Image (spheres, rainbow, N blue to C red):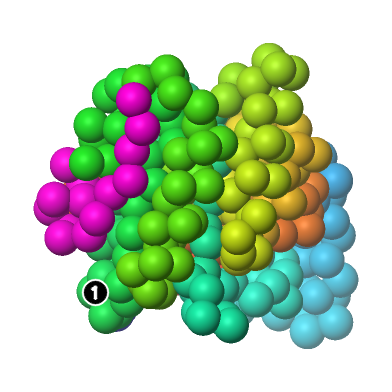
């Protein structure tokens, strides 16, 4: 787990260094005047925090600096780190609800638009849970895209877990139902169901996602609905998150592709908009590049 935390810090430090540089530039100036604070707020907005969150952070930083009397760049950076960590943490419970209850497996739906890395995330999560000695079953309910089922089958073989799939074009809700039924019969710990990559602008497809949720929950309650968002999409990802949360009760967010050009502020923006936590982050293309989200490690990487 420590190795994953180190990777999170390293990835973010490599991709987000400009944010830390701006903080250091502002704090190393001869004086913290209004223009310096405005530069910092503008930078936070461009990092996809959103106007309200950026304004709140700057105001809180101003207050904290005034109360502490800090004036050295090192002291000011420490205050910034504490304030950002507090905001990113948000008091959320980031644990995954993956415990069997009443002889039923935990049921986890992964949802999100095409191209976010949803199917890959589902496979990586199966690997992560298997490494924790959980018995996992995969359900390939993305029946509109043949490659998705094949991809999940490959993950099943790689991880050594069974996969339930239907014929291409078959009803995705029925595949979800069969996956839950198989999970109950096999007495697995967790059933991971990969759903179709709904375009959040297509109401019919979104309605069908709601149907998948309702049908999958007939035999056992849904434990988690994880919304997978490409971290590089910024505010567009936030728009997706809001629409999906209106269709299914999202319990957590997985930020995929949190490397390269990812804008870290989207973490704060999404959590504030949905009121649900970022629970997992994808840090690369490797099979083990899925980690539990740690706010302190995240902020350390941002400010490197």
Q: Quadrant of the C terminus?
A: bottom left
Answer whether residue 85 is visible to the viewer in this image.
no
Q: Specify the quadrant of the image occupied by residue 222.
A: bottom right
- Are there few (<14), some (14-19), or many (20+) residues within 10 Å of tag 1? few
Depth order, front residue of 222/218: 218
Magenta range? 154-167
Q: Residue at x 57, y 81 (%)?
A: 101
Compared to residue 6, the image places residue 121 above or below, namely above
Q: Residue at x 60, y 20 (%)?
A: 199
Compared to residue 144, the image places residue 196 above or below, namely below
Lateral position of residue 41 relative to residue 8, left or right: right
Rendering coords of residue 168 (x, y %): 35, 20
Answer whether residue 183 is visible to the viewer in this image.
yes
Compared to residue 75, the image places residue 106 above or below, namely above
Residue on which the image places disc 1: 131
Q: Residue at x 13, y 50 (%)?
A: 157
Lateral position of residue 246 relative to residue 17, left or right: right
Depth order, front residue of 303/147: 147
Rendering coords of residue 18 (x, y %): 47, 44
- Element assignment for label 1: loop
Q: Tell me if residue 37 is in the magenta stretch.
A: no
Marker count (numbered): 1
Q: Specify the quadrant of the image occupied by residue 118.
A: top left
Lateral position of residue 46 relative to residue 117, left or right: right
Depth order, front residue of 190/272: 190
Lateral position of residue 175 relative to residue 125, left or right: right
């Amino acid at each position: 787990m420590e190795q994953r935390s180190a990777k999170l810090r390293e990835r973010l430090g490599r991709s987000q260094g400009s944010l830390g540089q701006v903080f250091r530039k502002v704090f190393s100036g001869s004086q913290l005047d209004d223009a310096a604070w405005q530069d910092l707020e503008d930078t936070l907005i461009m990092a996809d925090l959103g106007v309200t969150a950026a304004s709140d952070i700057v105001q809180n930083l101003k207050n904290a600096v005034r109360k502490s009397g800090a004036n050295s760049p090192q002291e000011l950076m420490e205050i910034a780190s504490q304030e950002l960590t507090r905001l990113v943490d948000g008091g959320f419970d980031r644990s995954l609800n993956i415990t069997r209850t009443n002889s039923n497996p935990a049921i986890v739906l992964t949802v999100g638009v095409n191209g976010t890395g949803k199917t890959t995330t589902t496979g990586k999560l199966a690997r992560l849970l298997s490494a924790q000695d959980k018995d996992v079953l995969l359900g390939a309910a993305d029946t509109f895209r043949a490659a998705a089922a094949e991809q999940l089958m490959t993950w099943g073989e790689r991880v050594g877990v069974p996969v339930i799939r239907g014929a291409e074009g078959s009803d995705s809700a029925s595949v979800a139902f069969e996956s839950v039924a198989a999970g109950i019969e096999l007495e697995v710990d967790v059933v991971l169901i990969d759903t179709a990559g709904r375009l959040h602008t297509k109401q019919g497809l979104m309605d069908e996602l709601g149907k998948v949720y309702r049908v999958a929950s007939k035999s056992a309650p849904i434990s988690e609905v994880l919304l997978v968002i490409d971290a590089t999409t910024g505010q567009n990802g936030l728009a997706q998150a809001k629409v999906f949360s209106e269709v299914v009760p999202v319990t957590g967010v997985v930020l995929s592709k949190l490397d390269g050009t990812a804008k870290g502020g989207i973490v704060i923006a999404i959590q504030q908009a949905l009121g649900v936590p970022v629970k997992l982050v994808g840090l690369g293309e490797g099979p083990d590049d899925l980690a539990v989200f740690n706010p302190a490690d995240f902020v350390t990487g941002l400010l490197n």
